[in-house]
Amino acid sequence: MFCKTKVWLINPVLDFLLFSGGLGWFLLSLHLFVPDQFTLHTQSVLLVLGSLVLTNTHFGAPLLVANKTGAAKFMVKPLLLSIFVVATIAALWAPPLLSLLVQAYLCCVVIHYTCQNIQIVRLYLQRGNFELSRSATLCLYTFALSLSTWSLTRQVIDDGSALVSFQGLSLPEWPFLHPVVGFALAVVCATSGLILMVQILSVAASTRRLFPVAAALTLISTSFMFCVTGTISAVLWLFVPAFVHAIQSIGLHLIETPQGSKLSVWSWLSKCFLLGLGITYCLPACCHYVGIGEQHAYLAIIVVFSFHHFVIELLTRSSKTKNLALEPALVLQNEQIPRVALCIEDLVPPGSGVPLTGA
């Protein structure tokens, strides 16, 4: 029999828009095909609202959820947080260190996007009772990570295309990579993708189950995200941080955090927003008040605590995905979540979903 298990976290339309990247593609389509209605002003307003409201909410969410997940509890211990504070202070007083951290961040943030997409795919597979073997799961990770890494390295291989500055901070010279590196990654990506497809077809044939549509949509969206190039890529990556990655993150945190009423949901979202606002705006303002350059303070705090964010999200997802996949009645399915939408990621510059692109 074909799989009849309910694999959607909410419903087909909202899952596509919120979890499979559809909202990003919708905004890109508006930009490309209805430019008269989707003006530059409208686009700017969306991006500002996204970075102000959604990025901050997304940035604060895992810190609150971490208190309820065993694997990530140590990430909010005072001693560990103090290490990140010391690292931030060091970055403030040593601009070369801050430049290196920013450069590392621009690479890691794309891997961060990719890992979350893989986790969403695995979640849909588990809910659809479509079990991949260990080798197929390895191929899934290899395909997605080699694809995103290839999208990064091809910017460095094309001499002169890498970012030389970010938010007014000069970056170290990017190491030049031989074209064979990009070719090797492309071969690994294509090979693992082909093996994954064969294994998926094999599982489908042996179990008579269809590959979950939601997982397929997420994989397709992820692949296009890193394959598109040129002007379209630059425009798409204006929307990916705000309206793809962070929406996924907040949505996942919402459905994995038990809520008793709509009021409690709004209360939780408000706390996430205020916590993110405190980290991304209030702390830099305090640094500026004591004589530290506000722009550098902002960069140091965002970049250092983004690494904390990357780790805590990974640990939170790893410890919650299995339970979430097996949960029969999700909060969102019971209509206890109001119509919130949109969330976003940690300030990847325009044109840099492939964050090395200096578009």
Image (cartoon, rainbow, N blue to C red):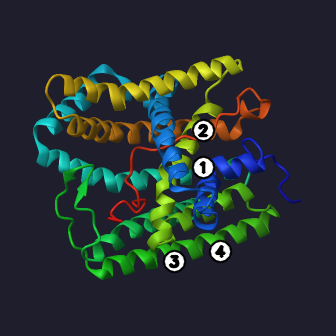
* First in residue order: circle 4 vs circle 1: 1
Residue at image point 51% right, 77% down: 191
Tag 2 near tag 3, CB within 8 Å = no
Q: Amino acid at mark 1?
A: Ile
Tag 2 near tag 1, CB within 8 Å = yes
Identify whether 114 is placed above or below 276. Answer: below
Left or right? Give the position of 261 relative to 152: right
Q: Mark 1 sits on what residue?
A: 120
Does dot 2 land on a helix, a strand or a loop?
helix
Residue at mark 2 to residue at mark 1: CA–CA distance: 9 Å
Does dot 3 land on a helix, a strand or a loop?
helix
Q: Amino acid at mark 2?
A: Leu
Residue at mark 3 to residue at mark 4: CA–CA distance: 11 Å
* First in residue order: circle 2 vs circle 1: 1
Residue at mark 2 to residue at mark 4: CA–CA distance: 29 Å
Q: Amino acid at mark 3?
A: Thr
Q: Mark 3 sits on what residue?
A: 191
Q: Mark 2 sits on what residue?
A: 252
Mark 2 Cα shell of 10 Å, populated few (<14), some (14-19), many (≥20): many
Q: Position of residue 138 (x, y in %)?
A: 52, 61
Q: Nearer the viewer, residue 146 or 133?
A: 146
Q: Which mark is residue 229?
A: none
